[in-house]
Amino acid sequence: MEGYSAARFADVHLRQDHVDGQVTVEARVSVQSWDDAPRSATMRVVAPDGKVFETSVEIAQGGETSLQVQIKEAQLWWPNGYGAQPLYQVEISLIDKDIKQLDKRNYQIGLRTIELRQQLDQWGKSFEFVVNNVAIMSKGSNWIPADSFPTRISDEYLEGLIRSAVETHQNMLRVWGGGFYEEERFYDLCDRYGILVWQEFIFSCSIYPLDTQEFLDNLNVEVVENVRRLRHRASLALWCGNNEMEWGWVDWNWKDPELQGLKAAYDQFFHHTLPEWCLAEDADHSYWPSSPSSDTPFESPNGQLQGDAHYWDVWHGRKPFTAYRDQYPRFMSEFGFQALPPLATIRTYADESDWNMTSYVMEMHQKNASGNSLMVGQMLDTFRLPKDFESLVYLSMVLQAEGIRYGVEHWRRHPDRVAGILYWQLNDCWPVASWSSLDYFGRWKALHYATRRFFSPLMLSIEDVPPKQSVYVTNEKLESWDGTLRWSLETLSGDVLTSGQEPVYAAPQAAAKICEFDFSDRISDENTRASVFVAELWQGRQVHIPPDCELCSDQTCIFE
């Protein structure tokens, strides 16, 4: 409950205009008054270095006015990995003729521009975010509510989750439409740590009564309140209509004739009404109708030519990890593979007598009905049968890390075609077997450790098609990189069969094949299971690598 007397702010809309390194911060103010007394509004902006910018204006007749301050030599906000995250503090006050403060709003902002760039190219249409005129490779994961009981989420726990994403080179989180609108502290952390937010409206995987006016009226209040609440955020990247509902209308079993009226209502709401509401309240951020979507209603919502994609044929469809290499989405916003949580977490819900994948407790801590069998099936395609439950737990996490790595490295070898990779999912809301890289207690699973490697700005990867091995270097930095590739064909016992090194020049924001090897003359049926290909990326071009030289990235591949 809020109480006011005389007047209050009905709305404050902060916007930015960037010209030649100078930023104009504007506050468009709407005042609700209960009398005709004269009043003024003030804006105070405090820079990260403490410098203050202030202005004041009289409230115009009708209660609307605009305040502006100009910030020269502005400190720009950047996503994680592209620069710093300086934050400016903004205070807007409503003052009466006696200099009494009637109302006040406080905001934390970062000075930056952002756009969703979609341009025709040789593969269809691009889908990349551009911040401060720099194209960003979006790397991250999907965010779900951090606890089934949100009041249990402490500030320390929440920050630990966000910081864990940052420590693995992530720069984007997709706030899933099946969760809820997060609290201010979530967005505060994303602002502070440089995490872009793909923000979905809370609609997911269902058919809603969008043909009912009372429901639409309620949605209008929900949408306007949340857009106004979040539109100033430096971290906000995109408004997205829903999760997987357009895909549902096209490819799921929503075909009954009696549902077609609701399909028309869906079309009207997500392709017309909702974007109009968003544009009216926030013209500075792009709107996307659904995830996945091609932005052409009901046409190839999960296609490869334009828009974003969800790919679940490896997990739900039981395809091998190699199937990821058949996919070239413009933006992969969801894909995943499950693992058990660490054994320390399993101990919190299962006694040792229940340490079996088919026990009631283990099956009830699994939200995918066939999840445990899918994990074990893929595991036996790749590894030997684990000797005990502890080994199975560990191997399930290794399997998850390997599968996601396989897809991410492939897409990062094609940055001119694939401009975003968000795996499902970052976190858990309860202790459970799931697709997450962080378990319910914030413990890192093997996938999260692997993420730190495959999301590294400078990454060596191997496209293995035994007996051929192709080595790639991906460089997302804004400057070029010079170094040395050292490679070797070895046996598992450590004997080197052949080796060499190559100079490496990695252009900025690009990926390139450095070399390709065909080991047909050295790999046979007799030694294939005992042979590995090792590649290492070292700083500097040197014939002999000195002991203090930096190993930047490495990879090992087997031949089966």
Image (cartoon, helix red, strand yellow):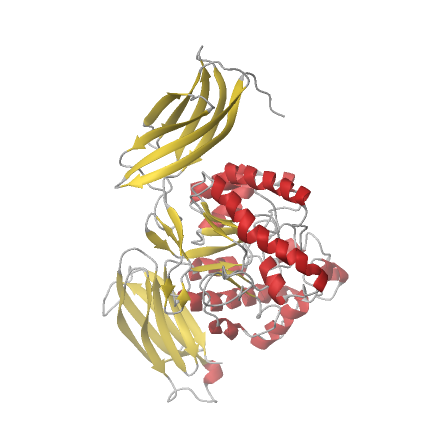
Percent x, y for residue 176? 57, 52
Q: Is residue 175 visible?
A: no
Q: Is residue 137 above or below residue 50?
A: below
Instruction: Tally the marks.
Output: 0
Q: Given the current orientation, which residue lies at the most extreme top position?
A: 98
In the image, taking residue 432 as reference, residue 43 lies left or right, namely left
Q: Quadrant of residue 553?
A: bottom left
Percent x, y for residue 4? 57, 19
Percent x, y for residue 253? 68, 66
Q: Is residue 165 visible?
A: yes
Q: Is residue 174 above or below residue 313?
A: above
Q: Nearer the viewer, residue 187 or 276?
A: 276
User: Residue sitting at 43 percent across and 40 percent down?
Assistant: 192
User: Residue sitting at 45 percent across and 69 percent down?
Assistant: 328
Q: Quadrant of residue 38?
A: top left
Percent x, y for residue 493? 44, 78
Q: Is residue 492 above or below residue 391?
A: below
Q: Nearer the viewer, residue 120 or 23?
A: 120
Quarter in which the N terminus is drawn: top right
User: Residue sitting at 30 percent across and 31 percent down?
Assistant: 70
Q: Nearer the viewer, residue 494 or 39?
A: 39
